[in-house]
Image (tube, helix red, strand yellow):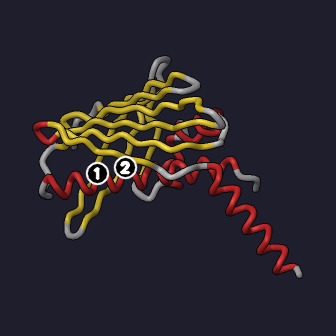
Amino acid sequence: MLKRSLLVVGLITSCASFSLAQEVSVSLKNEADHVHFVQGGFFTYASTGTIWGVLTDYDSIPRFSSLMHSSHVTERHPDYLLVEQKADADFLMFSRHVDLLLKIHEKPPDTITFEDVAGKDFYFYAGSWHIEDVPGGHRVLYSLRMKQKASSAPDFIVRKVFKRDAKRFLEEVAEEIVHRTSPS
């Protein structure tokens, strides 16, 4: 009887978690001169506070994102933060380590903009998060425009990896929002 009760509770929790965030959508546009622009998003029933809490928990990103090795706030200023991040991208025999120093501007409760100011691995890397009120919940929107410096991988592989990793990252963010919304 106890096993059956636990199974029912597990199924209810799984169904509740699934309904808190919908499938992630991602589109990739390739501009001239190897510039890539990704847009993505997902719907969630979570509160703005929960969404904001996940998006601004920079030091915890490696805990819920399989792509991020480290992420640390290195400086806090009145108008911006500096966040150092390290990540890897792998596809077949190609591997790429990425170092970023993001200058982040938070505009609570709904907008975050960021840009890489180190310029180590990218000519430019800039984007935003936006939380939009929609009927029944919120839409979390993500955009990123970047141009990578030298890569050993052909551009068609870079595009494929970039889109795949953006989708995976958004899925992981959505899952973390669900996790923080779900009762323990």
Single out the residue that lies furthest toward the right: 1
The reply to whether callout 1 and callout 2 are in contact (CB within 8 Å) is yes
Q: Residue furthest front?
A: 135
Residue 115 horizontal side relative to residue 141, left or right: left
Mark 1 to mark 2 CA distance (whole Å): 6 Å
From this view, report whether residue 29 is shown above or below residue 91: above
- Where disc 1 sits, the SS reads helix
Q: Nearer the viewer, residue 98 or 162?
A: 162
Determine if residue 69 is in view. Answer: no
For label 1, the crowd category at 10 Å Cα-Cα, with few meaning under 14, some 14 to 19 and many 20 or more, is some
The disc at residue 162 is 1
Q: Quadrant of residue 105?
A: top left
Left or right relative to 178: residue 115: left
Q: Position of residue 169 (x, y in %)?
A: 43, 51
Residue 80 x %, y %? 45, 23
> Looking at the image, which residue is at 44% across and 59% down?
66
Tell me the residue that label 2 is attached to.
166
The structure residue drawn at horizontal position 20% and vertical position 69%, both measured from the top left corner, is: 93
Kind of residue at badge 2: Ala
